[in-house]
Amino acid sequence: MRIKLTFVPGLEVEFVDREMSLKKMEEWARESTRHPQVVFGPEGCGKTAWLRQSAVLLKELGFHVIYVDPLRKYFEAYTDVKEVARRLADAAAGVLGNARAWLATLAIDLTKLLIERMKKKVAVLVDDVFQAIGLNEAALYVKALLGLIEYPPRSIDAIVAVVATSEGVTRREIGRHRWAHLTPMWNMPRDGFRQLYDKLPGEKPPFEKVWRATGGNPNLLAELYKARWDADSVVKELLREKRIKAFVNSLSDAERELLRRALDDPDALFTREGIPLMDKLVDMNLLVDTLPERDPRFWAGEPPPEKDLGLGIGKDVAWQTPLHREAVRRALEGS
Ligand SMILES: Nc1ncnc2c1ncn2[C@@H]1O[C@H](COP(=O)(O)OP(=O)(O)OP(=O)(O)O)[C@@H](O)[C@H]1O
Ligand SMILES: [Mg+2]
């Protein structure tokens, strides 16, 4: 069953494509996640949509599923253990105090409860939890999930634990420990993105143009749609939101030169002099670094192309989307 998602206020869209990402979830359902899977990717690439569709998929595969999105104080529970939904609802309503922290905590506690109640197949999907609980707690949270996998209170047949994040900085923090598996997700592949584009009503620019601006990022597609396809205003919003001008003004001449080169080829930052600057751009969620080989085994879904400098994708480093790169270009030109 395909879920319905609010694409922009007033426009619902059915979940499209992402066949390989859903295949990956099926694989995890079959083999269990031996470590918590931390899935990271560009902002707005579709992680939440995929997790929510996956919750339904796992339910159809016979799992008892808990999905929480602490930032938005939202949850879904697919289980006949009534207590689970009740306690999540209380937490989301703030009955216990800080709703975000409680939802994050309960996701783990209630998965444990499901196992204690002899449920043999359980899944816990946690969205954007690191922003909700803070960087210091992120690694410990993942470790608690690992504990559930390694020492379940009763024997189980299958367990799936997945956490999604768009924060580049948490990825580095999590990566220092060996408590989780980090798996990247990319923007949508061209065909799937085309299906989404086709669903939008009204007059729109040619697909090719939209593809080259967004690189397949569904959130930017939504932003462009809301802005009546005025890419200029979307770039300006990115510039403001991420305070890119202030950042560029803080750079030395040498760093600015490096940044200029990275506009043409982001791999220019994957060098001794480039890495400090690259890390800052990753923290600002403008770049993704250390991209693995483009083998589907290493990706939650369709990998990006090997290299596509038009879209800002290098071998090791990529701009989150072409419009993110465009925002940086403007700031550089104006400085
Ligand atoms: N496969 C899809 N089918 C239909 N709509 C999608 C799909 N993927 C994403 N969308 C829509 O695109 C927008 C952005 O997706 P989503 O919120 O899932 O991204 P995200 O990676 O979770 O973003 P963030 O980094 O902000 O958490 C949403 O409106 C979502 O409903
Ligand atoms: Mg999300």
Image (cartoon, rainbow, N blue to C red):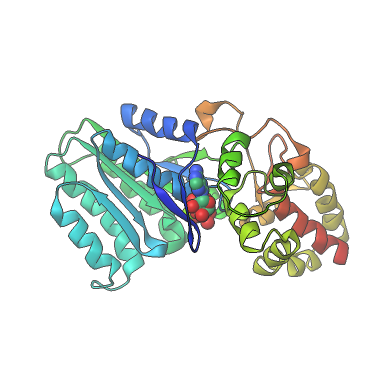
Instruction: Find residue 282 and report its horizontal and vertical position in percent.
Output: 64, 52
Q: Can you say whether 218 is above or below 294 in the image?
A: below
Instruction: Find residue 171 and report its horizontal and vertical position in percent.
Output: 53, 48
Question: Does residue 330 appear anywhere in the picture?
Answer: yes
What residue appears at the point 23 percent right and 53 percent down from the top-left corner? 109
Q: Hey, which quadrant is residue 90 in on the image? A: bottom left
Q: Give 201 or 12, whichever is nearer the viewer.
A: 201
Instruction: Find residue 24 and report its horizontal and vertical position in percent.
Output: 43, 31
What residue appears at the point 55 percent right and 33 percent down from the top-left corner? 302
What residue appears at the point 36 percent right and 53 percent down from the top-left corner? 141
Q: Give 279 or 273, whichever is nearer the viewer.
A: 279
Q: Which quadrant of the rendered structure holds the N terminus?
A: top left
Q: Give 47 or 105, whichever is nearer the viewer.
A: 47
Instruction: Find residue 200 and report its horizontal and vertical position in percent.
Output: 58, 51
Q: Can you say whether 26 is above or below 258 in the image?
A: above
What residue appears at the point 39 percent right and 46 percent down from the top-left corner? 3
Q: Hey, which quadrant is residue 64 in on the image? A: top left
